[in-house]
Image (cartoon, rainbow, N blue to C red):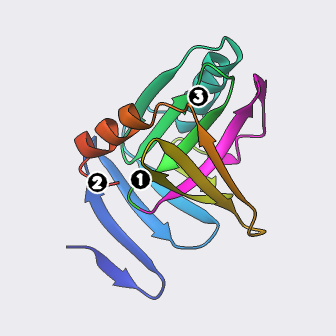
Amino acid sequence: MPQVSGRRWVAKVPAEVVVARKRQKRSTKRLLGKDVSVLREAEYIARRAADRDARVVTLGPLLFFSTSSGDAWVLDPEESLARCVARDGEALPPGITETAETFSVEWTSDYRLDGDVFVCADRSGAVRAVMGYPVAEIRRAARRMGTTR
């Protein structure tokens, strides 16, 4: 059961990752494991996007995906949060701060999967609906992670 403290909560999740979330623009997570790097995974998925190589990868509570159109995203399926890390094959600032024990993501959007469409709304309220993303694979990966999105 999560421990609630103000607007933050801490819960144990798979892959030895302890999550501290704040339902704002930033999530902070504590990592247990020397070989785990969220920033390195974000950079990897952006490179896959630059190569137009569609992939879906999970790491603890996060889901990373790239598309054949050159886009790449980091998702938090449990909270429906998203951050684009590549667009049209060009890497964007990952918005990830990482130390040996923790990492923090500056989430820029909320997202949902609507049929075969990936829909995201950024903090300004602009909504973008994209067809052609690997939505079925994202759903399957999120289910394996234990989320229902």
Q: Which mark is residue 77?
A: 1
Would you call the spot at circle 3 few (<14 residues within 10 Å), some (14-19), or many (20 or more)? Answer: few
Residue 62 falls within the magenta-colored stretch: no
Q: Residue at x 51, y 47 (%)?
A: 75
Does 147 sit above or below residue 144?
A: below
Q: Circle 3 — which element?
A: helix
Q: Earlier in the sequence, mark 2 or mark 1?
A: 1
Q: Foreground residue, 52 or 117?
A: 117
Q: Which residue is mark 2?
A: 147
Q: Circle 1 — which element?
A: loop
Q: Nearer the viewer, mark 3 or mark 1?
A: 1
- Which quadrant of the rendered structure holds the C terminus? bottom left
Q: Residue at x 29, y 37 (%)?
A: 140
Camera sees residue 93: yes
Q: Which mark is residue 66?
A: none
Tell me where the magenta segment starts and ends, as one range: 79-97
Q: Which mark is residue 40?
A: 3
- Identify residue type, mark 1: Pro
